[in-house]
Image (tube, rainbow, N blue to C red):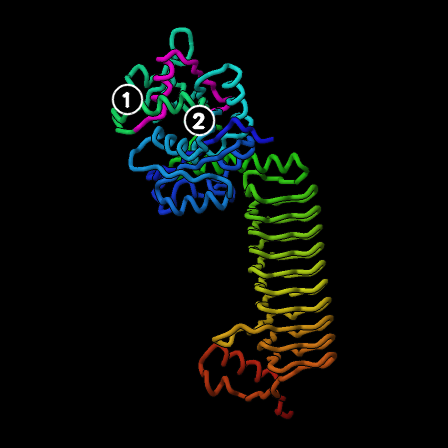
């Protein structure tokens, strides 16, 4: 049920200069989802009445991505005044005027913070009737983080930013995670009193804690169970650290769900991928996007699938595939390239060094070796000979090739589209098919073979080939000597 007294503010206004990227920091992908997508999904898991995302840098680009990820999120714009305090002010102004509940503030670049931890934070805040509750963490190295300063009794006294901290305060190891719960009314009151009189000349949200404490309000700090939960992503190193940790959790989750993954460290699975029980993922495999793997399928080793569907009992080895459908019991690879629009029927085969694009193979149809099959329909039970090419492009337009059911095409064929080969037809080795082939017909266009005797001796004298030919000729000449 929707928690009518909870609003969640997602801070996504920062520039993220340490990423050194033209992509806004919160849009960098992590396990197939933008950083902020993880945060928005966690926020929605709490069933809040409102989610407000605060944007500024690359405003339109970030806002568009947020709306695509969460169509009901409210977009709030931060103005030129910097700081998290100002961002929260903008978000509060975007909430309905009559909202008087609790406000949970999270950062758009902290993707691993889970809903259970946030739910515990909100629950503690409410049970203790606090004006503000801060999620903290204890780190071995707290450099760069705001420090939690507690009084002699161990209660939260204030938060001091790294730039403004004394040497004694910088020695503290409990840090502010940037995640808070506030009662909305005192939050609004104290934000109006926060200035930019600090080393960074920013309007700090953390100053609200000291102001609330000074007025006698109850404020608390709750340490997170694991410090990595609150780890932010500010550069590419931290992004890769988060990716490795999240991937390890995703892989372990699938193992516990009945998927065999023998080498978890070498397998990468996006958060959006689905796998059935008894599927197997072999080393060196990446499963991305909306890929789904059915029961009993074996994928890998050394395979990358993006937005692909793999049917029950199929085998896919050393293959690169995008937007392809692989039927039940089908076989793909090794060293196959499935481009978008490939559909392989049940028990079909795409073999070694085969590239397919916008092609449908019927049930049991096979393209076993060394072929390019593009813009083609292949009927049930047909076998395409080794080295076949569909010449689908005339320099201006793409055309389709249609091969009927139970046809047998020879090695080293070229099908010049548009062309149709009928059911049960055959084509000879080396044939270039430019005209339709009727059902049950044989298409051949081999020219008579002509052998030019002694061509090597005449045109390549003195070469090893000429010497070998001369020796072979001497061995085969009749002996004309008489006794």
Residue 364 x, y percent position in the rendering? 72, 63
- Identify the residue shown where x is 60% and y is 87%: 447
Residue 436 x, y percent position in the rendering? 65, 81
83 sits left or right of 476 in the view: left
| Residues rendered magenta in the picture | 203-227
Q: Toward which corner of the image does residue 264 lie, by quadrant? A: top right
Within 10 Å of disc 2 (Cα), the crowding (few <14, some 14-19, many 20+) is many
Residue 218 x, y percent position in the rendering? 43, 13
Quadrant in the picture for the N terminus? top right
Residue 25 x, y percent position in the rendering? 39, 41
**Regarding mark 2 in the picture, which secondary structure is present there?**
strand
- Identify the residue shown where x is 40% and y is 23%: 187
Q: Is residue 449 above or below residue 277?
A: below
Q: Nearer the viewer, residue 462 or 208?
A: 208
Quadrant in the picture for the C terminus? bottom right
Within 10 Å of disc 1 (Cα), the crowding (few <14, some 14-19, many 20+) is few
Total count of labels: 2
- Res 251 label: none
* First in sequence: mark 1 vs mark 2: 1
Q: Is residue 269 above or below residue 208?
A: below
Please name the residue that numbered disc 1 is placed on.
164
- Identify the residue shown where x is 37% and y is 33%: 90
Give the label, 1 or 2, closer to the camera: 2
Q: Find out whether residue 214 is within the magenta segment.
A: yes
Please name the residue that numbered disc 2 is placed on.
179
Q: Find out whether residue 98 is within the magenta segment.
A: no
Q: Toward which corner of the image does residue 417 lie, by quadrant? A: bottom right
Q: Is residue 440 visible?
A: yes
3D distance between C-alphas at marks 1 and 2 = 20 Å
Q: Is residue 267 visible?
A: no
């Amino acid at each position: 049920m929707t928690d009518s007294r909870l609003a969640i503010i997602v801070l996504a206004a920062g520039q993220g200069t340490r990423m050194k990227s033209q992509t806004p920091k919160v849009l960098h992908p992590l396990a197939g989802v933008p950083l902020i997508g993880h945060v928005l999904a966690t926020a929605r898991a709490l069933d809040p009445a409102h989610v407000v995302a605060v944007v500024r840098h690359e405003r339109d680009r970030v806002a568009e991505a947020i709306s695509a990820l969460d169509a009901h999120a409210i977009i709030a714009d931060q103005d030129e005044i910097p700081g998290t305090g100002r961002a929260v002010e903008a978000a509060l102004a975007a909430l309905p005027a009559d909202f008087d509940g609790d406000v949970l503030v999270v950062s758009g670049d902290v993707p691993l913070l889970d809903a259970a931890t946030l739910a515990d934070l909100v629950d503690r805040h409410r049970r203790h009737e606090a004006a503000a509750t801060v999620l903290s963490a204890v780190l071995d190295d707290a450099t760069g983080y705001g420090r939690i300063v507690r009084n002699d009794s161990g209660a939260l006294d204030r938060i001091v930013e790294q730039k403004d901290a004394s040497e004694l305060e910088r020695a503290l190891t409990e840090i502010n995670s940037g995640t808070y719960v506030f009662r909305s009314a005192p939050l609004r009151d104290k934000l109006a009193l926060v200035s930019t009189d600090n080393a960074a000349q920013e309007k700090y949200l953390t100053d609200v804690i000291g102001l609330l404490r000074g007025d006698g309000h109850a404020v608390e700090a709750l340490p997170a169970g694991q410090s990595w939960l609150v780890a932010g992503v500010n550069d590419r190193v931290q992004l890769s650290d988060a990716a490795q940790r999240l991937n390890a959790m995703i892989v372990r989750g699938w193992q516990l769900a009945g998927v065999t993954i023998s080498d978890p460290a070498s397998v990468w699975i996006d958060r959006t991928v689905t796998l059935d029980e008894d599927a197997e993922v072999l080393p060196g495999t990446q499963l991305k996007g909306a890929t789904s793997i059915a029961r009993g399928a074996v994928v890998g080793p050394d395979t990358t699938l993006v937005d692909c569907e793999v049917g029950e009992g199929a085998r896919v080895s050393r293959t690169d595939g995008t937007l392809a459908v692989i039927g039940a019991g089908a076989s793909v690879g090794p060293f196959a390239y499935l481009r978008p629009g490939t559909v392989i029927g049940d028990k079909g085969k795409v073999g070694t060094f085969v590239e397919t694009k916008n092609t449908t193979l019927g049930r049991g149809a096979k393209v076993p070796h060394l072929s390019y099959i593009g813009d083609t329909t292949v009927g049930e039970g047909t076998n395409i000979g080794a080295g076949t090419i569909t010449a689908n492009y005339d320099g201006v337009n793409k055309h389709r090739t249609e091969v009927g059911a139970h046809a047998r095409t020879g090695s080293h064929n070229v099908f010049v589209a548009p062309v149709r080969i009928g059911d049960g037809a055959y084509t000879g080795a080396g044939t270039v098919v430019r005209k339709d082939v009727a059902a049950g017909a044989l298409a051949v266009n081999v020219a008579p073979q002509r052998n030019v005797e002694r061509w090597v001796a005449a045109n390549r004298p003195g070469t090893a080939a000429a010497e070998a030919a001369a020796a072979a000729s001497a061995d085969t000449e009749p002996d004309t000597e008489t006794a």
